[in-house]
Image: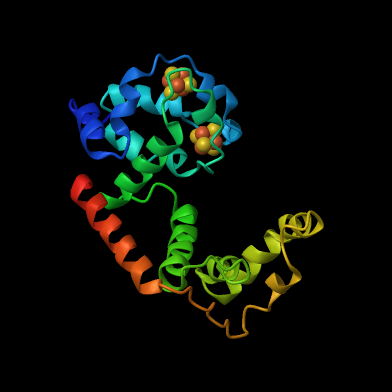
């Protein structure tokens, strides 16, 4: 087992909102209310325990730190007011800054999402899922999109997805039009990235 004695200190100092977990009383509310708990090996509560125990490798390689969907349930319910969601995202970002990718699929989706935001200032619901599926190439992308067909149909039924999302993936995808002030947005994002890198470095 890989231990790093001062890993907790590293998290408190370098991970976004990492110091907030100091006041955790291990009540388990976050673990019991997280809708993804059945898919997690380590709930947020357990992740904090591993941090305190110095289990750096186990924490930073855990796919669970990249599984959080930002539903905010834990943040709202934590009796100590710990921003659990921010710490989970902070840990994921910190792992990436250390050259570790805890969960490939989330990282792939994140890179497509980020490219859309940075390039146009928008998240285009017609483009992001297609580009995500095509990340592994055309054949794998088609297989992946077919595997997600029932989710797409459910979303369409609930009017959360427009039919234009089913553009065949071999058709050239036009870029979304850019928002006004895209340059200013990019400057802000660059600045935020540089500040984050300085903290994590
Ligand atoms: S709900 Fe808050 S105090 Fe309770 S285990 Fe989770 S982070 Fe700790
Ligand atoms: S914000 Fe993330 S960690 Fe918290 S309950 Fe939702 S999915 Fe779970």
In x, y percent, where is residue 14?
23, 39
**Residue at the extreme front of the image, as rendered:** 180
**Image side of residue 3 versus residue 75, left or right:** left
Q: Nearer the viewer, residue 140 or 145?
A: 145
Please tell me which residue is depicted at 57% across the width and 68% down the height of the picture. 124
Please tell me which residue is depicted at 40% across the width and 72% down the height of the picture. 182
In x, y percent, where is residue 195?
23, 52
Residue 51 is drawn in which quadrant?
top left
**Image side of residue 83 versus residue 52, left or right:** right
In x, y percent, where is residue 13?
21, 34
Q: Nearer the viewer, residue 50 or 166?
A: 166
Q: Nearer the viewer, residue 69 or 52?
A: 69
Please tell me which residue is depicted at 30% across the width and 45% down the height of the picture. 94
Q: Is residue 34 above or below residue 158?
A: above
Query: Can residue 100 be seen from the camera position used here?
Result: yes
**Image side of residue 40 versus residue 47, left or right:** right
Please tell me which residue is depicted at 43% across the width and 39% down the height of the picture. 65
**Image side of residue 154 versus residue 175, left or right:** right
Residue 172 is drawn in which quadrant?
bottom right
């Amino acid at each position: 087992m890989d231990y790093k004695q001062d890993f907790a200190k590293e998290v408190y100092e370098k991970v976004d909102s990492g110091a907030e977990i100091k006041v955790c009383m291990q009540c388990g509310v976050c673990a019991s209310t997280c809708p993804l708990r059945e898919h997690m090996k380590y709930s947020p509560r357990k992740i904090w325990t591993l941090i305190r125990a110095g289990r750096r490798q186990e924490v930073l390689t855990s796919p669970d730190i990249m599984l959080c969907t930002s539903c905010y349930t834990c943040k709202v319910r934590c009796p100590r007011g710990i921003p659990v969601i921010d710490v989970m995202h902070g840990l994921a970002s910190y792992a990436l800054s250390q050259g570790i990718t805890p969960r490939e699929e989330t990282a792939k989706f994140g890179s497509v999402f980020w490219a859309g935001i940075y390039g146009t200032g928008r998240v285009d619901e017609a483009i992001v899922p297609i580009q995500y599926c095509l990340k592994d190439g055309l054949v794998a992308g088609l297989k992946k999109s077919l595997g997600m067909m029932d989710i797409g149909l459910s979303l369409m039924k609930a009017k959360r997805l427009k039919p234009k999302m089913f553009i065949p993936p071999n058709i050239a995808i036009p870029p979304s039009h850019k928002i006004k002030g895209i340059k200013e947005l990019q400057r802000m994002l660059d600045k935020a990235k540089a500040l984050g890198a300085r903290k994590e470095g």
